[in-house]
Amino acid sequence: GAGGGTGGGGAGGDALDGEKGEETEGESQDVYGERKEGGRLGSIDAPGGLGDIGEPTTVEPPTPEGTPLAKRKLLSGEESEQEPPVIEEPPPEPEKADEENGEKAEKETEEAAEAEEPPQLKERKKKVKREQKTVSDGGFDFWNELEIQRIKFLNYLSRNFYNLRFLALFIAFALNFILLFYRVSDSPPGEEDILEGSGVFEEEEEGSGMEEAGGEEDEEEGPVYFFLEESTGYMQPSLSFLAILHTLISFLCIIGYNCLKVPLVIFKREKELARKLEFDGLYITEQPEDDDIKGQWDRLVLNTPSFPSNYWDKFVKRKVLEKYGDIYGRERIAELLGMDLASLDISAQQQEKKSEPDNSVLSWITSIDIKYQIWKFGVVFTDNSFLYLVWYLVMSLLGHYNNFFFACHLLDIAMGVKTLRTILSSVTHNGKQLMMTVGLLAVVVYLYTVVAFNFFRKFYNKSEDEDEPDMKCDDMMTCYLFHMYVGVRAGGGIGDEIEDPAGDEYELYRVVFDITFFFFVIVILLAIIQGLIIDAFGELRDQQEQVKEDMETKCFICGIGSDYFDTTPHGFETHTLEEHNLANYMFFLMYLINKDETEHTGQESYVWKMYQERCWDFFPAGDCFRKQYEDLLG
């Protein structure tokens, strides 16, 4: 009985294994392994596995007609054991077996399709979701990567801003070196070579010159051609390439300045305005003067919600409200600063739920503080360095129209070298006084022009031909320009440039006129202008040297000189590195800024109060540990 059961189990195992072999000829060994493991879970499949090895040669394979019936009988008896492997089968494999072998009946295909339909739908949905997710993630990653590369590029321009400036100056020198080979001609560059090599064209050129009525005067008024005189042929392409490269670098310099310096410019302006508002009560206790353009422009940004943006103290408006609100009225101060008093209630803010941020384009456009952006553009476009870079780019663009505009870029050497920049600053340091002095010079020259126009017109004949006099003072405008252009530049005044009054009835008056012009215009006013420039240069140079000397020989904290500490070896160095280290003081201030006010100690509260008032009396000016010990010992 046991043997028969075993034999029956082996026969059943053979039939099942044979059917499986027909159905899954294209399956890999792993699938077979999985199915055999599933079959080993039952007691029937264990001996059946032994029968599979020895009996396939004697037992004939079942016919295709009997395959479905045998499978149904086995599936009805071993339903719990065979269902999991069928579900675990990958959906494409049964379809491949059907296509390759063609041994399946229509009923079996329908049953397999019905049994495998739910997992296929699930897997298809998962695949679709995965594809959509990968597509969305791919687009998101693309924009993220693009933004990362943009930030890296801007950071690169910021780091290499001064290198780009130096490269632009080098290219400007190269361009101007090529400009040295320019020459002028009356004929186009291409026709000149033809005229030199052909006698026929030379005659035609001479004949055309005879036909033109005018002679030398007409020839001088003809068109003038500028071209490079070269024999190699590489200068013109090099000039074009360097011009394009110079314009590109000039534009990149503006972008680099916008990333490197513009935030600092905005920070300094916001810091200046915030401190004047908090400590000086500007726009509250006092108003800026009418001629203070900067103060009037800064009034525009007071009531904007974005101010302050770059300045680190974001609560400056609240501090101003608390400081001046009780005296001048909280409503008035809040209206001046654009604050909502209801929004300052902390309890009301805690009860309000934060809404999810809206990332739409419309919300982004409406969130832009237009008033603050206008003020920011005004600050940037009045910055001297930014205006210089814009002028630099405009001259580079005009250089494509006329290459001689690139000569203006050589002035950049005065902006790049600190010593030369000091020389330029000496002209603008006393700019207001200088302009007022030049205005006074123009007024004085005009007064002398009025006197000359009324009494001394006959002395202003600059023509050597007596038949055709060249009178320089017959009209007021010509007379004034003659005095400004010739009289001011003359070493001895206007008297050196007009006729000698010897023997004339106005000789005495002319002597007084010439001497006073020389004294007031040449000796006094021009000397004042020169003195203002020279004194400003000396003052700036002394300031730089004094700052440099103080940083090297005086302690920044206490201000005591190195002579006091150098009585002992390395005394000044030890004092500035250990006792009065600037980094320690900066760290202490940042520590107080980040620490909660309720946790301050007595000393910290004192220093924090002084810092809030921008009073620096807590610095030990003129005092140190060594000096205290000497006072105690002395």
Image (spheres, grey):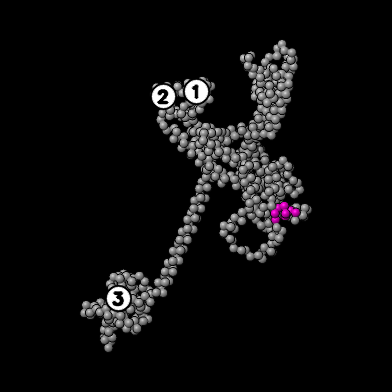
User: Which residue of the protein is positioned furthest toward the left in this rendering?
Assistant: 58
User: Residue 337, how many percent across, how many down?
Assistant: 70, 53
* Callout 1 secondary element: loop
User: Residue 19, how many percent across, how many down?
Assistant: 29, 77
Q: Name the residue tied to disc 1.
A: 212
Which range is magenta?
Answer: 332-339
Q: Specify few, some or many for label 3: CA neighbours under 10 Å numbering under 14, 14-19, or 20 or more.
A: some
Q: Does residue 154 belong to the magenta stretch? A: no
Mark pair 1, 3: CA separation: 107 Å
* Callout 2 secondary element: helix
Q: Is residue 313 visible?
A: no
Question: In this picture, is 206 found above or below 24?
Answer: above
Amino acid type, mark 3: Lys
Q: Any mark on residue 201, and which?
A: 2
Q: Does residue 335 belong to the magenta stretch? A: yes
Amino acid type, mark 2: Phe
Characterize the magenta stretch by its predominant secondary structure: helix
Q: Specify few, some or many for label 1: CA neighbours under 10 Å numbering under 14, 14-19, or 20 or more.
A: few
The residue located at (48%, 39%) in the rendering is: 245
The residue located at (74%, 15%) in the rendering is: 506
Front residue (pair 471, 489)? 471
Q: Is residue 131 visible?
A: yes
Question: In this picture, is 332 found above or below 393?
Answer: below
First reached walking from the N terminus: tag 1 or tag 2: 2
Q: Name the residue tied to disc 3.
A: 104
Q: Any mark on residue 530, and which?
A: none
First reached walking from the N terminus: tag 1 or tag 3: 3
The residue located at (52%, 50%) in the rendering is: 151
Q: Quadrant of the N terminus?
A: bottom left
User: Residue 74, how many percent across, how many down?
Assistant: 32, 82
Q: Specify few, some or many for label 2: CA neighbours under 10 Å numbering under 14, 14-19, or 20 or more.
A: some
